[in-house]
Amino acid sequence: MICCGAGTAADTEMTTQLISSNLELHSLSTGRLPRVVTANRMLKQMLFRYQGYIGAALVLGGVDVTGPHLYSIHPHGSTDKLPYVTMARP
């Protein structure tokens, strides 16, 4: 699973580190590898909670037991599951 982002560098870095830690805890508690949809849910719930004050726009992709996944995650917490994703700053 890979996550990359755009926006405020500190926000993007801390967001991805926090979710990475939470996924590791989830994996230890369940005894299974986390699914990409789990990471997507954690990211969008966290970003939605802060209503865009965290300046992190992310692309999350990976392969798990259910197949390949690619998500675009916006700073307000909305997500899109798409076959391909691009992001740019205006």
Image (spheres, rainbow, N blue to C red):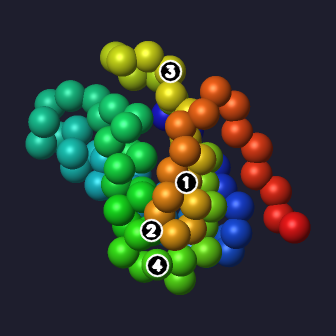
Which residue lies at the image location 29% right of the left edge and 55% below the top edge? 22
Name the N-terminal-most of marks 2 and 3: 2
In the rendered view, does 83 fall on the left or right side of 71?
right
Give the residue pinned by disc 4. Answer: 51
- Disc 2 marks a residue whose amino acid type is Leu
Residue type at mark 3: give it.
Pro
* Amino acid type, label 4: Gln
The quarter holding residue 50 reads: bottom left
Give me the C-alpha separation between circle 3 and circle 1: 16 Å
Q: Nearer the viewer, mark 2 or mark 4?
A: 4
The local secondary structure at tag 4 comes to loop
Reading the image, the residue beneath label 1 is 73
Whether residue 28 sits left or right of residue 22 in the image: it is left
Disc number placed over residue 47 in the picture, else none: 2
Q: Is residue 65 above or below residue 41?
A: above
Q: Residue at image x 31%, y 47%?
A: 23
What is the distance, in whole Å, between disc 1 and disc 4 at their CAs?
13 Å
Precedes in sequence: disc 1 or disc 4: 4
Question: Quick check: can you spot residue 25?
Answer: yes
